[in-house]
Amino acid sequence: MTITELFSIFKSNTRAACPELAPFNESNTDVLDKMMYTSAEIINNTLSEFDNTKTIINDSFQYGYGKSGWYIDLALAFQYGDSLVQGANYDYVYETVRAAGDAAFVIKQAAFELQTNAKLLKVASIDNSGNLIKVPDAEFAAFITYCNARMQVVGDPLTPVTYNPCIIKFTPTIIYDANYDLATLKTNVLAKANEFKNTFPFNGLFYKSGKEGFEDYIVNKVDGIKLCEITAIFMTDASDVTVPVVNRIALPSGYFNYHADVLTALNNSANYSL
């Protein structure tokens, strides 16, 4: 409803409710008109604020504010080096949204964890070789500022975190089919071991065996491998704490690299037998 429409309603209602004011002389009419028009402006502004608030609330439901997917989507949308501006709904947005794949998108993986009295947003970047890494200090400082502007909602404060990779170490024993060339098999095993690492779901569990495990992955992905068994499995986290792995383990960093000894062992003929 416009100010003019509100003013017209006030005017007609006032005339109907207060007939004793009639006849309206020019002086009285001018004063009343000004009073009613001012009231119309105030009410119109109040109604506009109600509409804006309704839009913000509806957007909150539509976009899932405060849900894990919302945090992750915003984390991946971070543009390093770009400034935020206040949007129409009082949130902060980028004035220019860059194309997918632009170097400004330094956050390559993100995961949200709801803990007791804490909300963690775990993130990682990549190096020039495409390997996941801890987000560099300058980029991470800018990301924290971005999180404070775009992601703080009612409840426990959000804490962004980034870590160096966990390190997985194990000893492999591999049985292969004699009809296959061992040198080729070793090359293929190394390639699939790296594929397992690179396609590992961020913040997932590292499994020794089973449909999501390393052993089954190698057997299923490399023709000629009849059995793959890994033993003496250890995980070292970003704080240099090393723990044994029985069949599965959570990775505090959200991702992992192999210990150098693992890659050496996977390429060592002594660990392969018929």
Image (cartoon, rainbow, N blue to C red):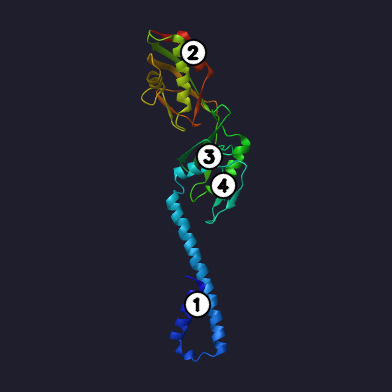
Q: Earlier in the sequence, mark 4 or mark 2?
A: 4
Amino acid type of disc 4?
Asn
Q: Is residue 176 above or below residue 12?
A: above
Residue 17, located in which quarter of the rendered image?
bottom left
Q: Secondary structure at mark 3?
A: loop
- The answer to whether residue 31 is above or below residue 256 is below
Mark 2 and mark 1 lie on one chain; the one further toward the N terminus is: 1
Closer to the camera in the image, 137 or 237: 137
Determine if residue 48 is in view.
Answer: yes
Residue 267: which disc? Answer: 2
Q: Which mark is residue 100?
A: 3
- Dividing the picture into quadrants, the one containing residue 139 is top right
Which of pointers 3 and 4 indicates the residue nearer the eye?
Answer: 3
The residue at the point 56 percent across, 80 percent down is: 34
Please name the amino acid that badge 1 sits on. Answer: Phe
Q: Residue at x 46, y 85 (%)?
A: 15
Q: What is the CA distance from the residue labelled 1 to the residue labelled 4? A: 43 Å
Which badge, 1 or 4, is on the more N-terminal residue? 1
Relative image position of residue 47 (x, y in whole percent)? 48, 67
Say which label, 3 or 1, has the lower sequence index.
1
Provide the residue designation for mark 1: 7
Residue 84 appears at what percent x and percent y? 59, 49
Instruction: State left or right for residue 80 relative to residue 68.
Output: right
Mark 4 or 2, which is nearer the eye? 2
